[in-house]
Image (tube, rainbow, N blue to C red):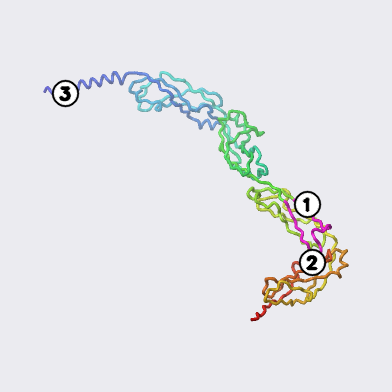
Amino acid sequence: MKSKVWTIVLSAVIAFGLWMYVITVERTETEQTFYNVPVILDGESVLQERGLKITSDKDLSVTLKLSGSRSALNKLRSSDITVLVDLTRIYEAGEKTLPYTVSFPGDIQNGAIEIMKREPDSVSLTVAQWDTKSIPVEADLVGTPAPGFLIDEQNMTTDYKSVTISGPKELIAQIEMAKVTVDMTDKTESVERREKLTLCDKDGNPVVADLSSVVVDPYMILTKVPILMEREITLKVDLKDGGGLKKTDPDVKLTMSFDKITVVGNPAVVSKMNPVIELPSIDLGQVNESLEGMLIDIPLPEGVSSREGDKVEVSLIIPEMKTITRYIPKTQFEKIGVPRDYTAEITTGGLTITLRGRADVMDKIYEVGIRVIVDVEGKTTSDRYKAKIIVGSTEGIGAIENPQKPYEVYVELTKTESVG
């Protein structure tokens, strides 16, 4: 019985203590200040539909001094408080001062917390008329490449031809183009670089204004600037003696519209080019009269061009020439270079040789001795072999032949029996 009484007394003491705690602590009214409570801007999409946008600092916050029961305030955090600004009431640009609403989590009973003080008691915003447009992108090259190198501006590229800009209407109106600057000072090879854009006016000058509120998409541009090498190359046309003419004759004159060209192309290719380009030679034995304005192609590697063009004009002056034909019997043929242990017999009966020379010396043709020489050195089979025509000592007379029908004779080569 005594134990039961003590249990009842203890229970009563505990209950009284809990009641006193609730009365003196949990229900005691107190005040607490919450700092840097973030402000939520509601209705920005509506502003965009109206062509407006907030341009001031969006990271807004307020300080709230709250009063309420200790239990309610103890479980409240700044992040639990919702501070909301309704932007849908804005219809035009300018400086705006708007009220805000404060709400608390749903588990806090209505009226359990009272707002004693707001700092500030309203929110100030800057609203701008907003605009969006597309502007062209231009590469702005500064500096010059190293001597002997130049910029291939025709093949310069950017990965975007235009960009989109958005921002306050008065700023967007000033911007007409975007430039990407690439420094080409002393460059000897192509440049590939991603650079930030500079916003410029219609004259290409940078816009002088605070452009921090302007959004550029994309704002970095990849620019590729090819570098070319230029070099001077000599052109050469060789003359081959023949038909009674020599390239050293004073009345044989070769002229070219130009004998030097400036080539331009990939540095890796141009740097390896021969300093002299050998153009097709001219066989004087195949030229029957002077040539005026003959165009010869200039062979250049792929991707390399000449500032002077791809053809050179060549003129050749020769004296007046005459031709006659003479039949040379095989008795006047000579064999040379017959291999050891072989015999050689020319079976061709003779050759009709065309002789050409200056008109003033052709009267002396009767004095000319003609040799037909067949060289079979290193040959061991019977066949037709080219004959070399040697005209006697009279200057200005020589043999000419048709390249499609050269002077040839048939030679039978027979191996001799060795004597034991």
Check disc 2 and give the amino acid type.
Ile
Is disc 3 in contact with disc 1, using a CB cutoff of under 8 Å? no
Q: What kind of element bears circle 3?
A: helix
Q: Report the side of 367 relative to 23 (left or right).
A: right
Is disc 2 in contact with disc 3, using a CB cutoff of under 8 Å? no
Sort mark 1 into few (<14), some (14-19) or many (20+) by Cα contacts within 10 Å.
few
Residue 7 numbered mark, or none: 3
Per the image, the residue denoted by label 1 is: 257
Q: Report the side of 5 relative to 80 (left or right).
A: left
Q: Compared with residue 101, is residue 339 higher up or lower down, i.e. above or below?
A: below
Q: Is residue 136 visible?
A: no
Sort mark 2 into few (<14), some (14-19) or many (20+) by Cα contacts within 10 Å.
many
Q: Compared with residue 164, is residue 77 higher up or lower down, i.e. above or below?
A: above
Check disc 3 and give the amino acid type.
Thr
Q: Compared with residue 300, is residue 6 higher up or lower down, i.e. above or below?
A: above
Per the image, the residue denoted by label 2 is: 400
Q: Is residue 59 magenta?
A: no
Is disc 2 in contact with disc 1, using a CB cutoff of under 8 Å? no
Which residue occupies the foreground of this view, 53 or 37?
A: 37
Q: What kind of element bears circle 1?
A: loop
Q: Distance between the residues labelled 3 and 1?
A: 129 Å
Q: Which of marks 2 and 1 is nearer the N terminus?
A: 1
Check disc 1 and give the amino acid type.
Ser
Which residue occupies the foreground of this view, 189 or 41?
A: 189
Image coordinates of residue 282 in percent, x first then y, are 76, 60
- Quarter assignment of residue 6: top left
Q: Write down the region rendered in magenta.
A: 234-259
* Name of the residue lying farthest toward the bottom: 420
Q: Quadrant of the C terminus?
A: bottom right
